[in-house]
Amino acid sequence: MGNNKLNQSIVPRLQNHSIVFVGMMGCGKSAIGRLVSQALELPYHDADEEIVAAAGMSIPDIFEQFGEEYFRKGENRVVSRLLTDGPAVLSLGGGAFINDETRQLIKENGISVWLKADLDLLMSRVLRRPNSRPLLKDANPRARMEELLETRTPIYSLADIHVESSRNSKNDTANAVMRSLKKWLDQHAEQLASRVEQ
Ligand code: S3P
């Protein structure tokens, strides 16, 4: 990590676009996002943390008291605000990229990175904090996760860059993201400024 040559081949070409981590709960968006932001010396923002700070309450409490739709509206507002302030590294909650409007904003203002992980890896990670994900508050959290994974995978696959979330080291995954970013920018940096709905 912290390879200066690699950083120089990424950061100037981002212009004001942010690197946006998307993917299922437990895929490692926050941990990898932090590492990539440190390596690239860019600011880091976690959308879930910003929502919690703005609402003054936890995500399970927001879902319980106001419902998912209310949470999604707040999430869309927070992500739009964070995207106006690039370049930065952003980690989004698992559902943010599923919203058409949010996904379009990301396309115009960011480069999306999907961290892919299989069901077993996701479950082993989310079970470390079983009460923090209201969508998994279910008699069978594994079946719920599987259902979400199945319906969301085609949408996550619209992301610009796909990287496997490694079972081993976070640094390995962060390095794989940086290599993929460089490769993606080699091919797309020039079109970045004009990416709008086609
Ligand atoms: C959600 C994922 C959570 C959080 C909320 C909803 C989702 O974030 O935003 O519980 O819809 O997948 P993480 O992906 O960081 O767990």
Image (cartoon, rainbow, N blue to C red):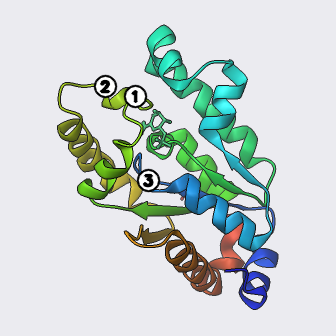
- In front here: 59 or 67? 59
Q: Amino acid at mark 2?
A: Lys
Q: Which residue is mark 1?
A: 131
- Res 193 quadrant in image: bottom right
State if disc 1 and disc 2 touch (CB < 8 Å). yes
Amino acid type at mark 1 = Asn
The residue lying toward the viewer, choosing from 170 and 160, is: 170
Query: Residue beneath label 2, please?
Result: 137
Quadrant in the picture for the N terminus:
bottom right
Marks 2 and 1 sit apart, C-alpha to C-alpha, by 7 Å
Label annotation for residue 23: 3
For image coordinates 51% across by 16% down, the residue present is 61
Upstream in sequence: badge 2 or badge 1? 1
Q: Nearer the viewer, residue 38 or 129?
A: 129
Which of label 3 and label 2 is nearer to you?
A: 2
Mark 3 in CB contact with mark 1 (< 8 angstroms)? no
